[in-house]
Image (cartoon, helix red, strand yellow):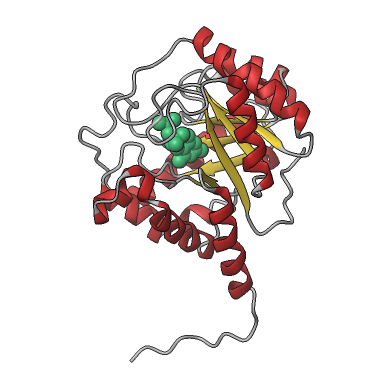
Amino acid sequence: MGGLDDTREFQLMGVLNVTPDSFSDGGLWLDADAAVRHATELVEQGATIVDVGGESTRPGAEPVDAETEIARVVPVIERVASAHPDVTVSVDTAKHAVALHAVDAGATFVNDVTAFRNEPEIADLVAERDVSCCLMHMQGEPRTMQDDPYYDDVVDDVKAFLDERVRFAVDRGVAPTRIYVDPGIGFGKTLEHNLALLHRLDEIVALGYPVVVGTSRKSFIGALDGAAAGERLPGTIATNVLALERGARVFRVHDVAQARQALTVATAVLSTPGRRAPRYR
Ligand code: HH2
């Protein structure tokens, strides 16, 4: 499977939104030529996975129909897959028809923010075509998910949810080695929920599936220091490094080159031997 190399410490999943309304890059890559050019930039900067999405999932986003989503993503996926055979092309969708056309066009990874709840037959497609998938946690649906999110214990609840969705996928025939999980930062979560998930990410890692983390430019960063979406790279990098240290494997980011440098340095430090147990006074 191109690009999904389990021997790497971390992998970068570059974000490519072919939408008019994504929260930080909406409208930039709606034109297929511009989208394909941007995919090449992401790959040159170090992305081993390019995640192509045709529907925004930002809070309050209006849903789009399958035909519109297919028209946006399929021509881009086809061209990116043929231009970059060593790269994993991912489709960010919760619709079976979109996933099917995307896989036919060369996608080998299905990133479903509903973890196969919206259209469970995506699990059968992933199983039959032996492609990889990311199962993400979300409370509610994008239009209303930020209204009043509630958990008994956000980390325990997200972990139990992901465990249940992994079982569902495996029951439908998906190979366990094809499964990635994601706590869904910003999807039906308050600032405190996002911080708890990042702080205790090792508990999600303990599920035993590679963990994907998507914090890139998200509003919880702005909630902490007032930064606008285009100014949240330092906060994104801080969360990526902390998530790496806790065992996350795949980082879904808009700014691939910068994340790669931060994670390369962090990996070098973390893999240097000789650390003594910290002493607290
Ligand atoms: N976040 C977004 C979309 N897809 N997929 C995974 N696995 N994890 C995430 O955290 C995640 C995701 C939202 O970010 P973005 O694509 O930049 O914006 P939009 O949904 O507005 O297109």
**What residue do we see at 48% from left, 52% from top?**
204
Inspect this view and state whether residue 247 appears. yes
The x and y percentages for residue 155 are 37, 51
Q: Residue furthest left?
A: 148
User: What residue is rendered at 41% in x and 58% in y?
Assistant: 234
Residue 82: which quarter of the image?
top right
What x and y, as percent, mark residue 269? 59, 75
Give the image quadrant in which the ligand numbered 1 is located.
top left
Q: Quadrant of the C terminus?
A: bottom left
Residue drawn at point x = 68 percent, y = 45 percent? 44
Instruction: Examine the rendering and report whether any part of residue 164 can be seen.
Output: no
Q: In this view, does 127 lie above or below 281?
A: above
45 vs 54, nearest the viewer: 45
Q: From the image, which quarter does the N terminus lie in? A: top right
Instruction: Indicate left or right for 181 with 238 as reference.
Output: right
Percent of width and height locating residue 144: 26, 26
Considering depth in this image, is 85 or 101 the residue closer to the camera? 85
Where is residue 97 drawn, in percent x and y? 58, 12
Q: As drawn, is 125 to the left or to the right of 182?
A: right
Comparing 123 with 197, the one in front is 197
For image coordinates 43% across by 57% down, the residue present is 239
On screen, residue 127 versus residue 147, left or right, reads right
Q: Compared with residue 168, is residue 43 higher up or lower down, i.e. above or below?
A: below
Q: In this view, does 12 lie to the left or right of 127?
A: left
Is residue 227 shown above or below 67? below
> How many numbered callouts?
0
